[in-house]
Image (cartoon, helix red, strand yellow):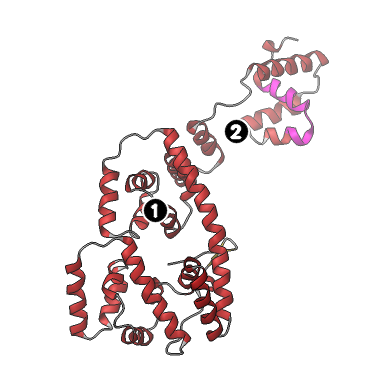
Amino acid sequence: MKTDLMNGTRKTAILLLSLDQSLASEVMGKLPREKMEQVALAIANADHVTREEQEAVLNEFKTAFVSRPLMQPAGPETARELLERTIDQANVGPIEQRLDEQLEAGPFAFLHNRHSDDVRRIIEQEHPQTIAVIAARLPANLASQVLAGFSPSQQAEIVGRLARLGPTDADVLAEIATLLQIRSSRKEVRVQGMDHAAEVLHESERTMSQAILNTLEQKDSNIAETIRDTLFSFQDLDNLNDETLETILKETAESPWTVALKGCSESLRQRVIKRLPTKVGDALKTEMKSIGPLRLSEITAGQQQIARAILILEANGHIELAAPKVNRIKANNRIVRTG
């Protein structure tokens, strides 16, 4: 019997009867409910299927299958169509939005799930034009958080270049992204080692850990500085109680607070000023306005100097700090630094 004499429902029934039962049930489960009922009825009534009918249906199916392309056409539209067929309509929107963001990001998509501090560390040494190109490929909220880590003058420079951005060559984007991926993988390995070293020192007796850091300072000042930053960074001031903060301010009066506060959050800045005598706080605010924009390197150096002074105060027993950052935050079974 020729297949063109059979209706589609009977053809489907014969095809399913020719398959393994588990596979046939899986295929049948993909049919719309109405069509599924029609096919089930056809199977129930298919008492007299000849060998000729079965071969005709299988040959038609084989011809149709071979004539189709080997793969569905790839691309965003195919992905969206598959999502809409697979997921409830109410849940498709958020996934499609993330898909659009990832497509817009191109080779920079790997940055999207990173903490803003990590992204800033990876890109902060780049030229402002390169940073603007990268920022254009980040979600707006992440780009804003990354930008907050730069000095006001750098922020203005980057945003200005971002506003003037035109099309960027795809090969250039791929090259920048590759370099950032290499840099980020190196930083992750190093940061985890630094965190562990800091944790070991924190668990050591105070005089011993201070002696180790002092000796390490002479051999490799960069590593010593990074370990100190892991033990305690300027941003960790926000986690201290008021009494400890007041002690620190009294003991570090000669430290570069004016410079350090230029690069911190407004909430931390106001909290520090509030803990100072009124006249001292007012003078500090006036001085901060008068010095104008500063380089990020200047702000970082000032903050590191204060952080080091705080660690010395702790080593001498004048204050007590909380457990190191490496013990405070864990995510995805790996240590993550903050600040």
Whether residue 103 is visible to the viewer of this picture, yes or no, is no
Residue sitting at the far bottom:
317
Three-letter code for the amino acid on which mark 2 is drawn: Pro
Looking at the picture, how far across and down is residue 239, in whole percent?
A: 41, 77
Quarter of the figure with residue 296: bottom left
> Mark 2, mark 1: which one is toward the viewer?
1
Residue 19 is covered by the magenta coloring: yes
Which one is nearer the viewer's eye here, 85 or 192?
A: 192
Q: Which residues are magenta?
A: 9-24
Can you say whether 179 is above or below 66 in the image? Answer: below
Query: Residue beneath label 2, please?
Result: 32
The quadrant in which the N terminus is found is top right
SS at badge 2: loop
- The amino acid type found where label 1 is placed reads Gln
Left or right: 21 as drawn, with respect to 244: right
- Does the magenta portion include 104? no
Counting residues from the start of the chain, the first of labels 2 and 1 encountered is 2
The residue lying furthest to the right in this view is: 51
Q: Residue at x 20, y 74 (%)?
A: 285
Task: Determine whether the residue tagged by mark 1 lies in a helix, strand or loop.
Answer: loop
Find the distance from the CA under tag 2 to the CA under tag 1. 57 Å
Q: Position of residue 265 (x, y in %)?
A: 31, 68
Disc 1 crowd, CA 10 A, few/some/many (<14, 14-19, 20+): few
* Residue with the mark numbered 1: 125
Relative to 154, say whether 32 is above or below: above
Quarter placement of the C terminus: bottom left
Q: Position of residue 301 (x, y in %)?
A: 35, 68
